[in-house]
Each structure stands twice: as structure tokens, then as C-alpha cells.
Image (cartoon, helix red, strand yellow):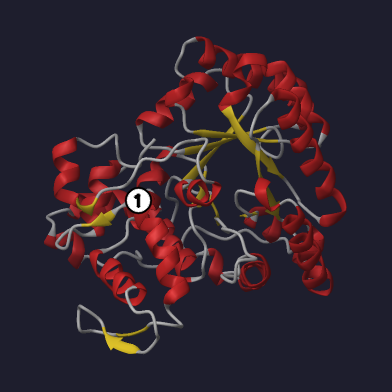
């Protein structure tokens, strides 16, 4: 698997200073966590789920979640389970499983994990892992034990992505203790934890809120405070933290706008891409682009999305710029500390305090590549498949 492989090879040669490197679905979880990129959620009830998975792969999607929880009705669970099993067995029987994205199943209770793996039979290796909703230390242990038992019984490696979204993790009086308890539980099962996901929809629901498309989740201050604490406790760069993924972007068509578009016009004019800018604005993707920038600035990597049109923007913004790469290389090339002017002569790089940032950036460069010096986000977005 490799990001941007759906782009013509000659165009990739123009776009990248360092090309994205391949990764294997059975490879290092540290690499896979970064390679998730835009994780596309799909209800497990979709009648053409196997075709959806194949179509997503052709559009550059590298990770999908097939949802048996909030995306379906309470009365649809049995039918959704049966459909998921049938669709994945069809995908496997057609010999197309190797081309599928990393597939995860979002379950409702621990008992579904072993049951689904057993029912999938020979198709079970298509499942990379499970997404664990409303995760707390009180109930999370049962999920993680179920994953361990299912993996051992089927001779599989199954990874977990717990979702921080429970009321205990949101409410101020219980949040810190809850997150520290979760951190201790995840530390005991570290080899199985791929990434920690943020459930911004449930977080917002705890306050009766829903963000509009012209604001980012960081403008919703009660939820932004929760994200801050999640990163602080579960996303540290001291070896105890995990990759924390960006919250869902849930809009894919524009309604009435109250605020001006959030995309500057000049970068698009420079690339003669004004129509692309207008399409992004019409689809409300200017808000997504701003939110992904803020995700990265706040230590989050990748993003939950609910529509294929979101994927290209997330992946284009995940490519490391040539300037970032030069800064990181300079920082990692100094062993004894100290400060230096950047290669672009526009900032100061400090070897010790910027080292963790540089190490994380180089891992992102490995899976998403480094843009050529004169290549902009606009070009990457057009190539990746603009809406």
C-alpha cells in the first residue's frame, strides 16, 4: 500500500521531492497509525459495501471504518452484522482483499468482536482491527481482552482504536481522572493500540451543541478544552503517548453561509485554479481544510471523514512541505543541541526542543512524502482528486 499511488506516475514525479514509501497492513503499528490519513466511516448496512470498499481504494482511501454503532439504528444491528460478514466474504472470495484499505469495525459491545471474527472465517484477515466507542477504563478492558482472545483464536493480529467520547471524559469534574485511568489501561495493552480517536460529535452532544460548517471544532470552546486534555494526557511525545486522530468532519454540501470563505484566493490564482477554490467553498471544504491545519498544529494526525470528497484535502495537507523537511533534517542532524537559522532563512530551529516535532514529521514524510520545492497544496489537492 502507498499513498497517492492512484495518481499517474509522471505527475507524482513532478509533485514529490521524496516519494511516499510503501507500507504493509501487517507492518509496524507506529507507521500504520500515521498512514491512516483520512479514515472514511461507512454504515455496515450499505447493500454494496464490498463495492464501496473497492471504490474507496481507487480514490486513494487507506483506511475505513465499517460502523455497527451510532451510524445505524438500534433495530438494524443483526442485519448490519450479517451484511458486513457477507460483504467482506464476497470481497475475499473475489481475491480483491489485498487491494482494500485498512478495514476496522466499530462495534457496540465486546461480544461482537469474537463473534464477527468467527463468522468471517477465511475473510477475517481483511479486518485490521476494531474501533471501541465511548471508551473508558471501566468498560475498555473487556473490549481489549475480547480483541486479544479473537486474535489468538484466529491466529490474527488485531489492533484497537479506542474513541474518547464518553460523558466521563467530557465533563470537567471527571475528565482528568478518566483520561489518566484510560492512559494506564492503554499502557498495559500498548502493543494492540494503533491510535486514539476523538469523538467530537458525542463530545458536542454532552453540551447540546453541534458546530456549523463555517466554524471549526476549535471554535467550540467546551469541546476544544476536551481535545486539549486528550492530547495532554494521551498524546504526549515522551514515549507514553499515542497517535491521536482528528475529529470527524461531518459536512459535505453547502447551506447558507454566514461568514466569508476561509481560503485565500491568491494561492489558487497563482495556479490558475480559481474553479477548484470555488468547488471547495461550495462543498464547505474550506472549513475542513482550516480544521485540518488546526488539527496538525494541536498535535493530531489524520482525520475521521464521512464522505469520499473529504479524502483528497486531508491527504494533500498531510504531505510534508519541502521547507518543513529541511527544518526537520537540520534539527535531527545536530547531536549536541543549540540553535541555528533555518535553511529557508525565515525562522530559528533549536535542536533539543524541536527534536520531537522533527521526529514526528519525518514519520509523516515517510508515508505521505515530501512535496517538491515549488509544489503547493493546491497542486497536491488537484492531483489527489478534488471534488
Measuring 73% from the left and 51% from the top, which residue is drawn there?
189
Q: In terms of image quadrants, where is residue 120?
A: top right
- Residue identifier under label 1: 368
In front: 219, or 83?
A: 83
Residues packed near mark 1 inside 10 Å, few (<14), some (14 to 19) or many (20 plus): many
| Quadrant in which the C terminus appears | top left
The residue lying furthest to the front in this view is: 336
Residue 173 position, x and y percent, is: 84, 74
Q: Is residue 272 left or right of residue 218?
A: left
Q: In terms of image quadrants, where is residue 383?
A: top left
Residue 335 position, x and y percent, is: 38, 79
In front: 323, or 165?
A: 323
In front: 242, or 215?
A: 242
The secondary element bearing badge 1 is classed as helix
Q: Is residue 190 left or right of residue 278?
A: right
Measuring 58% from the left and 19% from the top, which residue is drawn there?
88
Residue 146 position, x and y percent, is: 80, 36
Measuring 56% from the left and 25% from the top, which residue is drawn there?
126
The answer to whether residue 258 is visible is no
Q: Is residue 330 left or right of residue 88?
A: left
Measuring 63% from the left and 54% from the top, which residue is drawn there?
196
In front: 71, or 350?
A: 350
The residue lying furthest to the top in this view is: 93
Amino acid at each position: 500500500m502507498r499513498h497517492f499511488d492512484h495518481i499517474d506516475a509522471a505527475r507524482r514525479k513532478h509533485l514529490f521531492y521524496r516519494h511516499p514509501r510503501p507500507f504493509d497492513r501487517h507492518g509496524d503499528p507506529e507507521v500504520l497509525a500515521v498512514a491512516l490519513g483520512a479514515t472514511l466511516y461507512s454504515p455496515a448496512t450499505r447493500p454494496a459495501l464490498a463495492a464501496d470498499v473497492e471504490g474507496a481504494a481507487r480514490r486513494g482511501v487507506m483506511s475505513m471504518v465499517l460502523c455497527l454503532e451510532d451510524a445505524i439504528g438500534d433495530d438494524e444491528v443483526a442485519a448490519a452484522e450479517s451484511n458486513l460478514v457477507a460483504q467482506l466474504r464476497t470481497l475475499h472470495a473475489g481475491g480483491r482483499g489485498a487491494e482494500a484499505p485498512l478495514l476496522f469495525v466499530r462495534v457496540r459491545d465486546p461480544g461482537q468482536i469474537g463473534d464477527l471474527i468467527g463468522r468471517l472465517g477465511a475473510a477475517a484477515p481483511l479486518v485490521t482491527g476494531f474501533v471501541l466507542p465511548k471508551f473508558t477504563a471501566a468498560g475498555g478492558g473487556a473490549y481489549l481482552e475480547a480483541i486479544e482472545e479473537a486474535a489468538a483464536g484466529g491466529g490474527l493480529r488485531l489492533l484497537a482504536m479506542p474513541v474518547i467520547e464518553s460523558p466521563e471524559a467530557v465533563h470537567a469534574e471527571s475528565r482528568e481522572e478518566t483520561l489518566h485511568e484510560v492512559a494506564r489501561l492503554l499502557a498495559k495493552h500498548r502493543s494492540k493500540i494503533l491510535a486514539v480517536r476523538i469523538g467530537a460529535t458525542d463530545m458536542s452532544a454532552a453540551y447540546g451543541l453541534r458546530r456549523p460548517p463555517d466554524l471549526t471544532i476549535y471554535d467550540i470552546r467546551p469541546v476544544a478544552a476536551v481535545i486539549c486534555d486528550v492530547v495532554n494526557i494521551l498524546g504526549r511525545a515522551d514515549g507514553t503517548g499515542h497517535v491521536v486522530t482528528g475529529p470527524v468532519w461531518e459536512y459535505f454540501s453547502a447551506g447558507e453561509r454566514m461568514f466569508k470563505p476561509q481560503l485565500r484566493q491568491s494561492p489558487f490564482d497563482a495556479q490558475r485554479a480559481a474553479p477548484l477554490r470555488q468547488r471547495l467553498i461550495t462543498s464547505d471544504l474550506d472549513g475542513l481544510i482550516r480544521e485540518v491545519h488546526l488539527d496538525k498544529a494541536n498535535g493530531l494526525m489524520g482525520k475521521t471523514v464521512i464522505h469520499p470528497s473529504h479524502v483528497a484535502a486531508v491527504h494533500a495537507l498531510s504531505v510534508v512541505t519541502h521547507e518543513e523537511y529541511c527544518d526537520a533534517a537540520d534539527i535531527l542532524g545536530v547531536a549536541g543541541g543549540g540553535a541555528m537559522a533555518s535553511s529557508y532563512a525565515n525562522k530559528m530551529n533549536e535542536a533539543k526542543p524541536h527534536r520531537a516535532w522533527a521526529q514526528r514529521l519525518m514519520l509523516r514524510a515517510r508515508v505521505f512524502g515530501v512535496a517538491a520545492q515549488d509544489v503547493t497544496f493546491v497542486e497536491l489537492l488537484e492531483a489527489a482528486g478534488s471534488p
